[in-house]
């Protein structure tokens, strides 16, 4: 792992930050290991960020990578958004929240379904200056062009609310889902940004790989489902576990294989 760019001291410090714990005792000056600078991305046939070390460099700062899995590709980024940006996203959304819907596989229409019990707000790409800033940051960090992103969807989960396990990509054999692919093609990756820290419950769960990601304000989980051969990875089955106490706010950004614009 050292040869692959892993640095134990840096990784332990980042995990301590994420958990709100004090850093492990520093090594003496002679043997101290500095956090490695983020390196240039190697070329890859996979969708999404491919950092060589423990962080992704963006706009003069390092965004720590708390963990990454290669099969399927899942990555947890620390502090992708600041606390102020998270609060601003929630404030932008409060007055436009409606019951969340799902895509009807037969018709392609958006319908309310018992499997999804959150409320949500949809935004157009670039609708607000804050969204423009965040969309540019996401493009820089993921390597997926900004024009390939759908508009943000901000979701709010109250106690008991959940989103049962599902796939974000479309099944082209279903006429309604094929209709959704007419603009921008297939979805290839998802970024879920946590806009608050949920006291209990509300984890993003990946049941086929035994992974749960707890909601921590400012962090973001990225996962891609298009494999190098063009097939879709069903190990990215995921869901939002029921909120036990407090509430959960997230912002979701879906990324397409081609430029995406509604009505284009």
Image: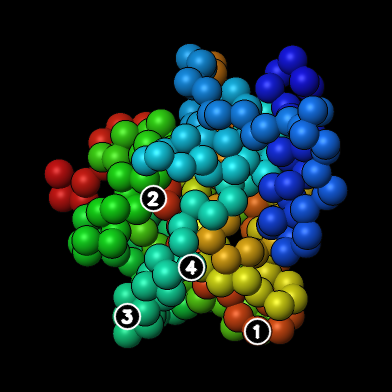
Residue furthest front in the image: 29
Dot 4 surroundings within 10 Å: few (below 14), some, or many (20 or more)? some
Q: CA distance from mark 3 to mark 1?
A: 21 Å
Give the number of the mark in front: 4 or 1: 4
Q: Name the residue that disc number 1 marks.
A: 246
Q: What's the distance in space between the residues labelled 2 and 3, CA to CA?
A: 26 Å
* Residue 198 higher or lower than 71, as above or below: below
Depth check, front residue: 9 or 200: 9
Query: What distance separates the C-alpha of mark 4 from that of mark 2?
Result: 38 Å
Above or below residue 57? Residue 138 is below
Please give the label number shown on residue 118: none
Tell me which numbered mark, 2 or 1, is placed earlier along the sequence: 2
Q: Which residue is mark 4?
A: 83
**Location of mark 2 (residue):** 176
Quarter of the image with the C terminus is top left
Which mark lies nearer to you, 2 or 1? 1
Looking at the picture, how far across and down is residue 176, in whole percent? 39, 50
Image coordinates for residue 135, horizontal then vertical, percent: 32, 49
Q: Residue at x 62, y 46 (%)?
A: 76
Task: Say which of 116 and 33 sits in front.
Answer: 33
Q: Residues within 10 Å of mark 2 (few under 14, many from 20)?
A: some
How many other residues sit within 10 Å of disc 3, few (<14), some (14-19) or many (≥20)? few
Q: Residues within 10 Å of mark 1 (few under 14, many from 20)?
A: some
> Where does the image place residue 84, in percent across and percent down from the top left?
42, 70
Q: Secondary structure at mark 1?
A: loop
Residue 147 visible in the current orientation = yes
Query: Looking at the image, can residue 187 be seen?
Result: no
Q: Earlier in the sequence, mark 2 or mark 3?
A: 3
Q: Are marks 4 and 1 in contact (CB under 8 Å)?
A: no
Q: Are marks 2 and 3 in contact (CB under 8 Å)?
A: no
Residue pointed to by mark 3 = 96
């Amino acid at each position: 792992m050292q040869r692959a760019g892993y640095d134990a001291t840096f990784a332990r410090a980042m995990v301590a930050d994420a958990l709100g714990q004090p850093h492990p005792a520093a090594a003496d000056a002679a043997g101290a290991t500095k956090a490695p600078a983020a390196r240039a991305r190697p070329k890859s046939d996979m969708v999404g960020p491919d950092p060589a070390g423990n962080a992704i460099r963006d706009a003069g700062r390092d965004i720590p990578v708390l963990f990454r899995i290669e099969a399927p590709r899942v990555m947890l980024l620390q502090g992708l958004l600041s606390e102020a940006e998270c609060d601003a996203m929630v404030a932008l959304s409060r007055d436009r929240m409606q019951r969340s819907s799902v895509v009807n596989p037969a018709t392609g229409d958006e319908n309310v379904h018992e499997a999804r019990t959150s409320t949500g707000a949809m935004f157009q790409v670039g609708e607000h200056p804050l969204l423009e800033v965040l969309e540019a940051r996401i493009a820089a960090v993921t390597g997926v062009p900004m024009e390939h992103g759908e508009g943000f969807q901000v979701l709010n989960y109250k106690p008991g609310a959940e989103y049962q396990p599902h796939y974000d990509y479309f099944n082209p054999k279903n006429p309604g889902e094929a209709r959704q692919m007419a603009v921008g093609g297939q979805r290839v990756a998802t970024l879920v940004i946590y806009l608050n820290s949920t006291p209990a419950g509300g984890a993003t769960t990946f049941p086929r790989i035994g992974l749960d990601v707890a909601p921590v304000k400012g962090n973001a989980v990225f996962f891609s489902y298009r494999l190098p051969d063009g097939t879709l990875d069903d190990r990215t089955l995921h869901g939002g576990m029921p909120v036990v106490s407090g509430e959960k706010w997230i912002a979701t950004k879906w990324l397409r294989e081609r430029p995406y614009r509604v009505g284009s």
